[in-house]
């Protein structure tokens, strides 16, 4: 490190991991600015967490005020801000949910907590997840997420994960069409339990729409069938809404779109509004009671982060705000389907609200992560930050900008996206 030099001149030689050559210096709304003054519309909302964009004034004000009062106190004491955040989340959650566990500060830890709660409530152990799921980077959540490449580096895979095919109708694992479907992917779970589990299943953990796995939107009826399946077998249904909650799909929780009343919902990312580190688990009364000694983290229930969460909920819970998410999302999908629907390299454009994926194929029609990654890299030249599915191994470009997006900004995203494909695919 070059101590004594201007902050802008410090290089990244001491940074452990690989970083881009670009240095970012400022963010405002949906825009991120690099040190040369170039601006980018951030279609990844940073790490899919800036629901209110960069530097939302109401979130910053709430954080500043809370920081001047009390930054942190051990979570075994009560505070107004934590009580208020728990109460507000219960008010907004799907019916039947009555408790909130905030002693976590990441989506991975929220998911592990929900799994422990389900195991404790049922006395069973195994957890069913989907092939393309992403539930976190801890050993337990990486073991229980889909994708072989995630388990490959682990010394020991955490036991108890049982992976099943996704409801990915465009590439149905069971070779069905929408006409023949019959929700075979739910029906067959019994066979996975009988032949591939340890015989007792505590939970199904599922993202309502896959965040990392390719923006897969389950077909109508999937969640109704899955919920009934779980209830009949006393398997707890955990909705991993780390990416989909807090308005991302145009409803406070994506579970609402599918009429699901889960046993637990896990939250993180968007709850922090403009980047505060806040996460949690919302549960039914039945899942309450996991002792603190079994799941609590020092930086969980941080008061400044909770103040950001409360300010974020106040804004996102307004119906006009959620309607804007639905309208801007529909606008982008309608425009891109009209302009790119016949492009031979665009296999599908899908999504709900501002959780949109564009599936890319090569000229022969095969999924192409090479082309997808190339397009994401080149997007920067067009002033767009786009990320790809499955940590660069997938073939879906994600369009998930901050939810404060206006129609004019949505049009700008489409202009730049269309220009990108016109340049790179011609
Ligand atoms: C659906 C989902 N679950 C869990 C996680 C893990 O969250 P965190 O990175 O906060 O541990 C992520 C992160 O990308 C996610 O998208």
Image (cartoon, rainbow, N blue to C red):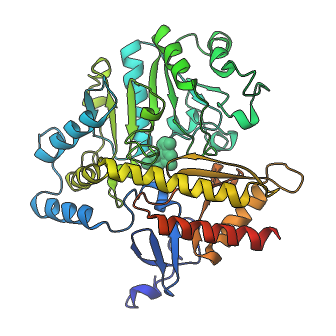
Q: Quadrant of residue 146?
A: top right
Q: Position of residue 31 (x, y in %)?
A: 45, 72
Q: Residue at x 33, y 42 (%)?
A: 104
Question: Left of 155 or right of it: where is 371?
Answer: right
Q: Residue at x 39, y 61 (%)?
A: 404
The answer to whether one can see residue 25 in this image is: yes
Q: Quadrant of residue 381?
A: bottom right
Find the residue positioned furthest to the right: 364
Depicted 17 relative to depicted 163: above or below: below
Depicted 190 relative to depicted 299: above or below: above
Q: Nearer the viewer, residue 29 or 98?
A: 29
Depicted 141 relative to depicted 259: above or below: below
Find the residue positioned furthest to the bottom: 5
Question: Left of 255 or right of it: where is 60?
Answer: left
Q: How many marks?
A: 0
Q: Nearer the viewer, residue 376 or 178?
A: 178
Q: Position of residue 137 (x, y in %)?
A: 52, 45
Question: Left of 206 or right of it: where is 56?
Answer: left
Q: Residue at x 52, y 56 (%)?
A: 400
Q: Position of residue 324 (x, y in %)?
A: 41, 54
Image quarter of the C terminus: bottom right
Q: Position of residue 207 (x, y in %)?
A: 52, 36
The answer to whether one can see residue 19 in this image is: no
């Amino acid at each position: 490190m070059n101590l004594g030099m201007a902050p802008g001149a410090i290089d990244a030689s001491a940074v452990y991991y690989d970083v881009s050559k670009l240095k970012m210096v400022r963010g405002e709304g949906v825009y991120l600015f690099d040190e040369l003054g170039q601006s980018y519309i951030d279609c990844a909302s940073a790490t899919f967490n800036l629901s209110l964009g960069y530097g939302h004034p109401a979130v910053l004000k709430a954080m500043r005020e809370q920081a001047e009062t009390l930054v942190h106190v051990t979570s075994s004491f009560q505070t107004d801000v934590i009580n208020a955040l728990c109460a507000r989340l219960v008010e907004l959650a799907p019916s039947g949910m009555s408790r909130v566990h905030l002693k976590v500060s990441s989506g991975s830890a929220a998911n592990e907590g929900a799994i422990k709660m389900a195991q404790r409530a049922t006395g069973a152990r195994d957890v069913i997840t989907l092939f393309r799921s992403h539930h976190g980077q801890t050993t337990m959540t990486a073991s229980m997420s889909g994708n072989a490449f995630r388990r490959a580096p682990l010394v020991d895979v955490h036991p108890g994960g049982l992976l099943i095919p996704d409801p990915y109708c465009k590439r149905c694992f069971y070779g069905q069409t929408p006409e023949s479907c019959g929700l075979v992917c739910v029906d067959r779970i019994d066979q996975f339990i009988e032949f591939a589990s340890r015989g007792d299943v505590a939970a199904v953990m599922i993202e309502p729409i896959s965040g990392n796995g390719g923006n897969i939107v389950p077909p109508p009826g999937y969640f109704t069938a899955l919920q009934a399946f779980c209830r009949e077998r006393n398997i707890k249904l955990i909705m991993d809404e780390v990416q989909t909650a807090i308005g991302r799909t145009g409803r406070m929780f994506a579970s609402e779109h599918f009429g699901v009343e889960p046993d637990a919902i896990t939250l993180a990312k968007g709850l922090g509004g403009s980047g505060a580190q806040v996460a949690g688990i919302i549960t039914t009364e039945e899942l309450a009671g996991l002792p603190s000694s079994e799941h609590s983290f020092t930086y969980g229930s941080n008061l400044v982060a909770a103040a950001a969460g409360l300010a974020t909920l106040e804004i996102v819970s307004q119906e006009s705000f959620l309607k804007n998410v639905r309208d801007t999302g529909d606008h982008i999908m309608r425009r891109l389907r009209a302009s790119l629907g016949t492009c031979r390299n665009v296999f599908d454009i899908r999504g709900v609200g501002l959780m949109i994926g564009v599936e890319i194929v090569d000229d022969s029609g095969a999924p192409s992560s090479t082309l997808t990654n190339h397009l994401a890299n080149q997007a920067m030249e067009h002033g767009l930050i786009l990320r790809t599915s499955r940590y660069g191994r997938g073939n879906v470009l994600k369009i998930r900008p901050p939810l404060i997006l206006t129609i004019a900004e949505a049009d700008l995203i489409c202009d730049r996206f269309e220009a990108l494909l016109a340049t790179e695919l011609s």
